[in-house]
């Protein structure tokens, strides 16, 4: 039984870059800032490619929603081993309005159109930390979901997934088709090597708009304010324990 | 994973000391780094089995103490009145991290550490020490690799840790003036706000001070592109042993007025004066940076690839480093970092920096296609994302850290003509055989600078004697330099004649006597007795 896997990958600000809040305090500066694929989505792509190498999957399709530059993200996925890409074009100025719910609707529609049996996405994006897309996509498709996956194994018509949860690890079985979200320890993504980078240039990326999938980008959320966390105050040294106790009492800590 | 407290303090202090003009700067967005890394951050390392303190330098190397006074109660009173008790740190236990070098190969016995904030305080300290015959050891980030940054006996340590103010950044000329205690990485991030970069980069950037970098004429990873500090440092303010402040500060790129004294302080490793301020010419920060990591079958291919890079990448090439298989095994094995490629006998890091990403990408792709096609390069990967580039750089920048985990490192930094470059590693590997755990070579092949390292479980005099002076003699025969960028410090002072003529050494000694008659500045270092 050979699956077609749909993997969602998001273009986000690279995690090694220092974030700066925009002067209008409604977002962060993205112009001229280095972006890269969301690290959890890299893990998702890697897992899908490994499934193909194990002959469990027959085709890996990488999807990204975003402006023109999202194609770079898809190319990275192709260089890692995905077979073809789908770029859902969303102009740069509308990117701010893009919500997990919109992406979930897009992914659900594509999963149906492409007849995918497995959808893998990163557990959360490092820019909004929503951790909602996988869950909503599963709900829209009425498919089972296995989130925070740290291990994935296929057994007849089912997936056995180990999940990272607050209390430790939980192993569940889900029937296919299913939605999985990848957690940090699922795998270590490969680097794309030069021969693969060059091969990726020839792979196909289909382009479409959200409206082609019947999805409209009406807002359900409004960003009120984006601010820096409070700056850390300098500590003070005290001469002895008595002074320490007095200062702690004065500030109401004890 | 065990972490030695003193090492952590030493390295974390570097990060905390990046408080510049009242703002806290950090290298990585901390929450993201914690979310994504499942291993220690870049600037921490776990302890090896040799947690014990290393032997006192004076014992191991049989050094005679100079005719200096010992620190008295009266002296302590003076320092405390000048600096306050918080900035006069006493006691050998408190100073453990300051008495030993980062490699844990030398150890002194100082019990006084002073932390001035201004040039005036440095002047008062040195003037007093000169009058009272107290030896002084200037110390920055304590990341030096030749034992030059720590005391040998009971020298008073004068630290630049609190001299971390940036005075000005001139955005038209690109000149930054700052105090000597600014941590390199923090300084670079500060000027980044103005679209500039510090023309110096090295693995120790999170801890080293710019004053120390200037005093050792550090080379680093981008010398190939931005040149040496002798070119990029425009001005220096230093304090002489007598306490006299020598002001050679200038923000002008061209200033031919008299003898250019600042060059005396650049590279003299704190023996001619304590550097308190610098003015550095900063190039524009590149808009587009790419890093290629390549696997090659032979060193001959490494040299040919370097030549091809110079020809085809020319003006955008900003770094050319190589790593041999032994070094890669060390980093992968000891630090559990994974290489992007399969095993190859040699690896290269080629970095390009330019103002136009598309332009650079086209050049780099053409270069990679041709070298891959001709078989010069066997495999490789390219990255433009900061996080990926940082991961690849870690393979090169953390080799020194990985080597420490083998036990004890015998570290050599040699300049060689390129045809002989790797032969030294091969000859020494054969010469040492199974006496050592590892013999590896890596470094700035683009500058002709080899980092040759041997490791053993613990220090053994027999191994050291087998290496030295053989390695220096080999180097001398091909007219190389026995210390390309690390300096002479304590460890190499007695081998200076392998690379400098007697006449030159004598003139150096005369200059030292002129500028520091009592010899209080960093004694036992740089020049032989």
Image: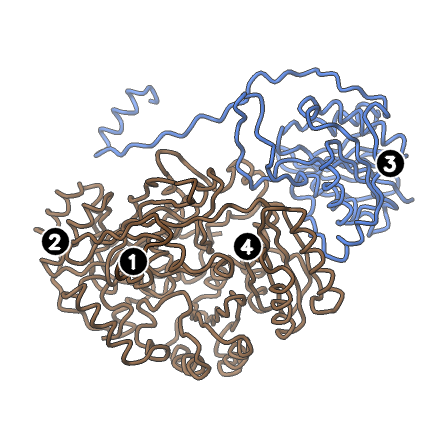
Chain colours: A blue, B brown
**What chain does mark 3 sit on?**
A
Callout 4 and callout 3 share a chain: no
Which residue is at a point 78% across and 27% down the rendered structure image? A137
Residue beneath label 1, please? Answer: B262
Residue B387 in view (yes/no)? no
- Reading the chain from its start, which is encountered first: label 4 or label 1? 1
- Reading the chain from its start, which is encountered first: label 1 or label 2? 2
Name the spot of residue B206 as percent of width and height, x first: 43, 49
Name the spot of residue B193 as percent of width and height, x first: 47, 37
Residue beneath label 4, please? Answer: B394
Name the spot of residue B468 as percent of width and height, x first: 39, 79
Give me the C-alpha separation between circle 2 and circle 3: 80 Å
Callout 1 and callout 2 share a chain: yes
Residue at disc 3, secondary structure: loop
Give me the C-alpha separation between circle 4 and circle 3: 39 Å
Give me the C-alpha separation between circle 1 and circle 2: 24 Å
Is label 1 in contact with label 2 (beta carbons under 8 Å)?
no
Residue beneath label 2, please? Answer: B128
Residue at disc 4, secondary structure: helix
Quarter location, residue B345? bottom right
Quarter location, residue B13? top left
């Amino acid at each position: 039984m050979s699956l077609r896997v749909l993997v969602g990958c998001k273009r986000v600000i690279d995690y090694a870059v220092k974030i700066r809040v925009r002067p209008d305090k409604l977002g962060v500066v993205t112009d001229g800032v280095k972006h890269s694929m969301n690290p959890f989505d890299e893990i998702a792509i890697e897992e899908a490619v490994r499934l193909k190498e194990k002959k469990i999957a027959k085709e890996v399709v990488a999807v990204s929603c975003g402006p023109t530059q999202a194609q770079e993200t898809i190319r990275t996925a192709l260089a890692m081993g995905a077979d073809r890409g789908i770029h859902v074009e969303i102009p740069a100025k509308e990117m701010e309005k893009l919500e997990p719910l919109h992406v979930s609707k897009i992914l659900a529609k594509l999963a149906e159109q492409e007849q995918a049996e497995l959808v893998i996405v990163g557990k959360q994006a490092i820019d909004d930390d929503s951790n909602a897309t996988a869950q909503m996509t599963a709900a829209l498709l009425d498919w089972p979901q296995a989130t925070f996956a740290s291990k994935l194994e296929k057994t007849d018509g089912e997936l056995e997934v180990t999940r990272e949860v607050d209390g430790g690890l939980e192993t569940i079985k889900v029937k296919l088709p299913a939605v999985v979200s990848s957690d940090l320890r699922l795998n270590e993504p490969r680097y794309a090597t030069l021969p693969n980078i060059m091969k990726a240039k020839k792979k196909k990326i289909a382009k479409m708009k959200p409206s082609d999938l019947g999805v409209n980008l009406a807002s359900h959320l409004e960003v009120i304010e984006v601010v820096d966390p409070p700056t850390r105050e300098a500590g003070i040294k005290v001469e002895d324990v008595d002074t320490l106790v007095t200062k702690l009492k004065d500030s109401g800590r004890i | 994973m065990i972490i030695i407290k003193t090492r952590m303090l030493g390295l974390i202090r570097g990060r905390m000391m990046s408080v510049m003009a009242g703002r806290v700067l950090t290298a990585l967005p901390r929450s993201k780094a914690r979310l994504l890394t499942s291993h220690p951050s870049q600037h921490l390392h776990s302890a090896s089995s040799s947690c014990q303190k290393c032997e006192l330098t004076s014992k191991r190397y049989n050094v005679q103490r100079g005719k200096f006074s010992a620190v008295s109660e009266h002296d302590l009173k003076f320092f405390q009145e000048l600096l306050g008790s918080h900035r006069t740190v006493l006691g050998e236990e408190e100073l453990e991290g300051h008495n030993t070098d980062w490699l844990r190969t030398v150890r002194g016995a100082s019990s006084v550490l002073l932390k001035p904030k201004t040039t005036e305080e440095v002047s008062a300290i040195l003037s007093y020490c000169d009058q009272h015959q107290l030896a002084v050891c200037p110390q920055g980030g304590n990341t030096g690799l030749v034992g030059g940054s720590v005391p040998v006996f009971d020298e008073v340590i004068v630290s630049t840790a609190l001299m971390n103010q940036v005075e000005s950044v001139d955005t038209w000329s690109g000149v930054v003036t700052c105090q000597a205690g600014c941590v390199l990485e923090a300084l670079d991030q500060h000027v980044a706000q103005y679209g500039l970069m510090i023309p110096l980069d090295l693995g120790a950037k999170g801890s080293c001070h710019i004053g120390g970098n200037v005093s050792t004429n550090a080379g680093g990873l981008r010398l190939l592109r931005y040149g040496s500090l002798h070119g990029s440092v425009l001005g220096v303010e230093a304090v002489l042993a007598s306490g006299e402040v020598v002001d050679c500060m200038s923000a002008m790129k061209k200033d031919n007025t008299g003898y250019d004294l600042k060059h005396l302080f650049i590279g003299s490793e704190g023996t001619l004066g304590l550097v308190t301020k610098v003015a550095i010419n900063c190039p524009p920060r590149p808009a587009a940076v790419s890093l290629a990591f390549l696997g090659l079958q032979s060193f001959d291919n490494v040299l040919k690839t370097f030549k091809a890079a110079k020809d085809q990448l020319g003006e955008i090439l900003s770094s050319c480093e190589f790593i041999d298989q032994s070094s890669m095994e060390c980093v992968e094995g000891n630090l559990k970092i994974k290489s992007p490629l399969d095993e190859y006998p040699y690896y290269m890091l080629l970095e390009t920096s330019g103002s136009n990403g598309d332009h650079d990408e086209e050049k780099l792709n053409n270069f990679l296609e041709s070298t891959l096609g001709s078989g010069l390069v066997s495999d490789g990967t390219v990255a433009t994302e900061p996080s990926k580039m940082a991961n690849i750089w870690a393979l090169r920048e953390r080799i020194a850290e990985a080597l420490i985990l083998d036990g004890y490192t015998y570290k050599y930094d040699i300049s060689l003509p390129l045809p002989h470059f790797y032969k030294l590693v091969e000859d020494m590997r054969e010469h040492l055989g199974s006496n050592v755990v590892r013999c590896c070579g890596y470094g700035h092949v683009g500058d002709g600078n080899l980092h040759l390292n041997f490791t053993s479980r613990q220090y053994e005099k027999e191994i050291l004697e087998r290496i030295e002076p053989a390695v220096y003699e080999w180097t001398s025969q091909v007219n190389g330099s026995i210390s390309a960028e690390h300096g002479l410090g304590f460890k190499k002072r007695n081998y200076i004649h392998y690379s400098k003529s007697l006449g030159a050494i004598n003139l150096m000694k005369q200059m030292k006597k002129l500028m520091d008659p009592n010899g209080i500045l960093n004694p036992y270092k740089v020049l032989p007795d």
